[in-house]
Image (cartoon, rainbow, N blue to C red):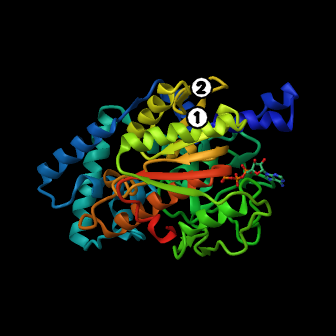
Amino acid sequence: MSSSLEENLKLLTSDEEVLGRIDVRHVDQVAYQVVSQKHGRLAILQSAEEKSIWKRIISRLELSFTETFLATEWRDVVLGQAVADADGYLAAKRPGRGRALGHLQKAQVWQAIDEFTSELASRKLWTYDSICVEAARILAESPSKPYGHVVVDEAQDLHPVRWRLLRAAVSEGPDDLFIAGDTHQRIYGATVSLRSLGIRVAGRSSRLTINYRTTAEILGWSLGLLAGQRVDDMDEGLESLSGCRSDVHGSPPRTAAYATKAREMDELAARVRTWLDSGVAPAEVGVAARSNTLVDDAVTALRRVGIAAGSLAQVLPGDAVRVGTMHRMKGLEFRCVAVIGAGEHQMPMAGAVTPVEEDKSLHAADLQRERCLIFVACTRAREDLHVSWHGNPSPYLTPLL
Ligand SMILES: Nc1ncnc2c1ncn2[C@@H]1O[C@H](COP(=O)(O)OP(=O)(O)OP(=O)(O)O)[C@@H](O)[C@H]1O
C-alpha cells in the first residue's frame, strides 16, 4: 500500500525536491530504522517460536491460561497501556478482554509476562510491537524529531504502540498529525481510543460521506455487509454510516455460487476475459481472496487461459491482472473486482477466529474483522463487482442474497 501511496503522490507534484522531502513508509519500517540505529540489526521473534516460549512458561508455572490469551494480554494490556511493572498491571483496566481476572490470577499472568519479556531480552529478540515501544522511547527522549508533519492513513488499524511512536516522531504543534481512517475497514488489531493516547480529535475531525470511487449500486450492496454492526469512532463513541452515498450509477454487483472450486476458478477466468475484451486494462482488474492458497489458485487459473496475472505480494508488470489477499487489497482500487472464495468455510476463516470458549471478546472481534475484510475487498471496485464462492455462501453474504 505504501508504494501505491507513493505513486499517487506523484499525481500531486513532480517536483523532485518536494518528493524527496516526503517519506512514505509503513510505520513498522520507521520503528525498525530508529531502533536499529541504536541497537544494530534486530532479530525478530517468529510466531511459532513465540508460541513455544509461552507454552514453556505455561507448563513451568502450571497455569490454566492459553498462549493466545497471554500473548494478547501482553500486547493489548501491557504494551497497549504502557504498563511498566506488577503494580501497574494489577491496577490496569482491561477493556475488551473477554475473561475477567481476580487478583491472584493477575499476579500469575504478570509473572508469565515478566518471564516472557526477560527471555526476549536475554536472547535479544524483538517483536514488531516491542520495536515500536523502544522506538517511541528513543524518540520521546530525543530533542530532534525525524518529521515535521505526519500524515497517517488507515488509522483504524494502528495499535497503541504505533500511535505512541507516531506521537513521538513529530513535535506537538499545528499540523503535527493528520489522520485518515475508516473504522468500518478495521482488519487488524482492536478498538483504540485516541483520547486515551493524548491525541485530541474531538471537534477537529470531519466525516467524509461522498464516495467518489464506486457506484451507488456497489456501495449500497457493500454497506449491506455491515448492516446492524456497532462500530466505534476511535474516540470512545460510535461511528455511523448514515449519509454515505455515491452520485455515480452503474450495474449492480453480481453474485454466483459454484459446486466446486475448480468450476469457480474456470468461471473467474471467463469473467476476467470478458472484462479484458470490453477494454478494461489488465492492471485495472483486481481479484481478491481470503487465503494465499486461493490467490495462487486464481493466478494459475488465469494464466492457464493465457491471461497475464500475478500476486500483489510481488512486484508486478504493468499489464498483469492483480490477484491478492483481502488484506493486500486495503487502500487499492480497480475498475473491476472479483471477490472469490466467499464461501461458508472460507469467510470467516476458521484459523483466524479465536474459539469462543477461549475468549469471548476476541472471538467477537475476530468475527467482526472478517466481516470488515470482505467489505474492504468489495469496496475496491470502481465500476463492476463480482462475488463468488463454491459450496454454501459465507454467513456475511446470506442476508444479501
Ligand atoms: N473530490 C473528489 N473528486 C473526484 N474524485 C475523488 C475525489 N476524492 C477522491 N476521489 C477519487 O475517489 C477514489 C477514492 O479516493 P481515496 O482513495 O482517497 O478514498 P479513501 O477514503 O482513502 O478509500 P479507502 O479508505 O476505501 O481505500 C480515488 O479514485 C480518488 O481519485
Quadrant in the rendering for residue 96: bottom left
Which x, y percent locates residue 330? 58, 47
User: For the residue carrying disc 2, how many other residues have a C-alpha within 10 Å: few (<14), some (14-19), or many (20+)?
Assistant: some
Which x, y percent locates residue 171? 72, 48
Which x, y percent locates residue 53? 23, 42
**Left or right: 242, with 163 as reference point:** right
Q: Nearer the viewer, residue 79 or 280?
A: 280
Viewer can see residue 28: no
Q: Which mark is residue 316?
A: 2
Quadrant in the rendering for residue 234: bottom right
- Against 316, residue 394 (above or below) is below
SS at badge 1? strand
**Left or right: 89, with 265 as reference point:** left
Residue at 76%, 42% (x, y): give it.
148
Q: Which mark is residue 322?
A: 1
Residue at 60%, 46% (x, y): give it.
337
Q: Amino acid at mark 2?
A: Leu
Label 1 near ligand 1 (CB < 8 Å): no
Q: Nearer the viewer, residue 344 or 71?
A: 344
SS at badge 2? loop
**Left or right: 250, with 39 as reference point:** right
Which x, y percent locates residue 199? 65, 61
Residue at 58%, 73% (x, y): give it.
236
Decide which of tag 2 and tag 1 comes sooner along the chain: 2
Q: Nearer the viewer, residue 100 or 348?
A: 348
